[in-house]
Image (cartoon, rainbow, N blue to C red):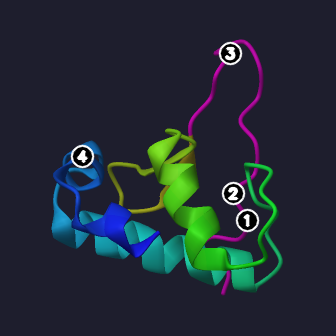
Amino acid sequence: MLEDLKEEKIVNKVGGRFKLSTLIQKRLVQLNRGSRPLIEMNTKNPMEIVIHEIMEDKIYLDTTGRVAVAVENPDEPAKDAGPSLEDL
């Protein structure tokens, strides 16, 4: 799992190491506060969940720096990624 963080693929997917760090930190806060994972895994490790959510393009940072959930079908409403940092 931590080897995934050393790969340039995940860094490039997010847009840089600082954005990756920000996305991971914000999503970990959401998961620790009760947000549901967007993928099904046989682990309770939140870091593993976040890494897989990023690798599967489930989450990203929007233009305001908030965690956003990728919508597979644009006609479908977006899923809730949990509370925003302003709510925390």
**Along the viewing direction, whichever of 80 and 10 lies nearer the viewer:** 10
Q: Nearer the viewer, mark 4 or mark 1?
A: 4
| Alpha carbons under labels 1 and 2: distance apart | 4 Å
| Alpha carbons under labels 1 and 3: distance apart | 20 Å
| Alpha carbons under labels 4 and 1: distance apart | 26 Å
* Label located before the other in sequence (4 or 1): 4
Q: In the drawing, what numbered circle is on residue 13?
A: none
Tell me the SS state at disc 1: loop
| Alpha carbons under labels 4 and 3: distance apart | 25 Å
**Along the viewing direction, whichever of 24 and 51 lies nearer the viewer:** 51
**Disc 2 residue type (three-letter):** Ala
Q: Is residue 88 left or right of residue 14?
A: right
* Label located before the other in sequence (4 or 3): 4
62 vs 24: above or below: above
Quadrant including the C terminus: bottom right
Tell me the SS state at disc 4: helix
Q: Report the magenta residues as a range.
A: 70-88
The crowd level at tag 1 (other Cα within 10 Å; few <14, some 14-19, many 20+) is some
Q: Locate residue 73: give its quadrant.
A: top right
Q: In the drawing, what numbered circle is on residue 73?
A: 3
The residue carrying mark 1 is: 82
88 vs 34: above or below: below
Kindly tell me whether residue 85 is visible in this rendering.
Answer: no
14 vs 25: above or below: above
Residue at 28%, 44% in the rendered image = 13
The crowd level at tag 3 (other Cα within 10 Å; few <14, some 14-19, many 20+) is few
The residue carrying mark 4 is: 9
* Label located before the other in sequence (1 or 3): 3
